[in-house]
Image: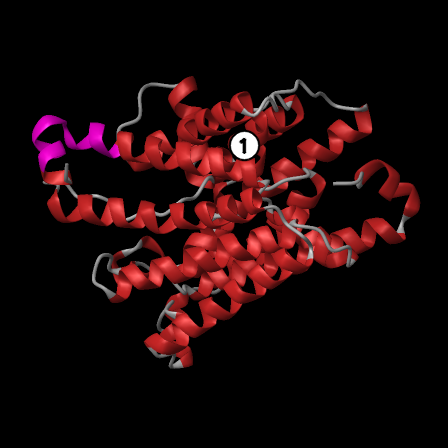
Amino acid sequence: MDLTTLLDRLSEPTLLVFGGLTVGVLFGALAQQSRFCLRAAALEFSRRKPSDRLPIWLLAFSSAVLATQLLAQSGQIDVQETRQLASPQSLSGALIGGSMFGIGMVLARGCASRLLVLSATGNLRALLSGLVFAVVAQASLHGILKPMRDWLSGLWTTTDIGSNDLTSFLGMTEAAVFLFGGLWFIAGMAFAVRNRSSIRHTATAVGVGLTIPLALWFTTSMSRQAFDPVSIDGVTFTGPSADMLMLFLNAPLETIDFNTGLVPGVFLGSFMAAMITRQLLLQGFESGPSMARYLSGAALMGFGGMLAGGCAVGAGITGASLFAVTAWLTLIGIWVSAVATDHLLEHWPEVGKTLSPSF
C-alpha cells in the first residue's frame, strides 16, 4: 500500500502523525536494544577504554550518511529542501550550542534521545531530566530565554558565508560522499569486531541509523503528495520535545505533523523492547548532588540544543547526513566539549566522585 492509497483513507495530519509514530517506535526499540548513546561513545573515546559504545555510534552514524545520500542521489529525497539547507542557519549557535549540549550531555549521563529511551524503561532520573530538558528548550524557543538565543544565533550565520552545504564548500563529488560514509562504516565494523560487539548490538545500531533516511523519505514523499505544505524532517528531539510538553500543558498544537508522533513513538518503542527483553527497572537519584548534576546538565542541553538547531541526533546524525555545515559544527562542538568535560572531571577527583560516575 503506497502513500497515495493511504492519503485516500486518512487525512494528511493523521498520516503524518502515524508516520512519525512508526519511525519513533523503530528508533526507540532499536536504540534501546543497541544501547545507542553519543555520550557513552565520547567517554569511551576520551578514556581510551575499548568497549562497544563507540562502534555502535559509528555504525549508526555511517549507516545514516550512506542511506541518506543514496536516497538523495536516486532522487527519492531532495536535501536542498530540508530545513538545514533551505533556510539560513546559525553558525555561532552551532558552535556555542553544540558545546553547551556536549557539557550537559556528560553531566546528565545521556543526550536527549538517550534520556527519552531510558525513561521508558523505568529510569526516573532520565524522566525528570528529560522534562527539564523540554522545559528549557521551550523557554529558549518561545519563552524567557528566547532573546538570549536570538542574540547568540545572530552573531554569525550562513548568510555570511553564502551557503550551508558542506559538499559544495569542499567540492565533494558523489563518489567522495559515499567513500566518506563507507570509511566510517568500515571503521565502525572494525571496532565492533575488535571489541567483540554482539551481532544484536551491531545490527540494531545499523537499524538506528536507517531510521534517519526513513524519516526523510517519508516526509519528502508526503511533501510531494500532500495538499498542504509539509516540512521535510529527519529525526530530532529538541523542538519536538518542547512541542510535546506544550501539547500536554496547553491547548492542542496548531500544527499536527510528523514530529507530533515521533516523541511518543520513541517512548513506546523503547518500553516495548525493554518489556519483551525483561529490562524494565525502576531507578532513582542516588543523592542530592547527583540530582543537581543531572538537572543542570539537562538544562544546558535544552538551551544548547535549541541554540544549535538540533540535538545529538537532530544535528549530529540527521544534519550531518545532509552535510549541513552547521550540523557538522554542532557535532564537533558536542564531541570536543564532552571529551573536555570528562577530562576535567577526571582531573578533579573531588568533583569527579560526585559528577562523573561510571557509565
Locate residue 98 relative to residue 353 in the image: left or right.
Answer: left
Query: Please, what is the three-letter code of the amino acid marked with disc 1?
Result: Val
Instruction: Say which quarter of the image contains residue 320.
Output: bottom left
In this rendered view, identify the residue nearer to me: 13 or 277: 277
> What residue is at 78 percent from the left and 30 percent from the top?
290
Q: Does the magenta stretch include residue 259?
A: no
- Would residue 316 be visible to someone looking at this image? no
Instruction: Say which quarter of the image contains residue 187.
Output: bottom right
> What residue is at 42 percent from the left and 39 percent from the top?
239
**Is residue 239 placed above or below 125 in the rendered structure?**
below
Report the residue that reaches farthest toward the right.
Answer: 350
How far from the left and from the top, in percent, is residue 71?
28, 59
- Would residue 353 be visible to someone looking at this image? yes
Judge the density around disc 1: few (<14), some (14-19), many (≥20) Cα neighbours within 10 Å: many
How far from the left and from the top, in percent, is residue 69?
34, 63
Q: Please identify the quadrant where the C terminus is shown.
A: top right
On the image, numbered disc 1 is attached to which residue? 117
Report the residue that reaches farthest toward the bottom.
Answer: 171
Span colored in magenta: 5-16
**Is residue 207 placed above or below 116 in the rendered structure?**
below
Q: State the SS at label 1.
A: helix
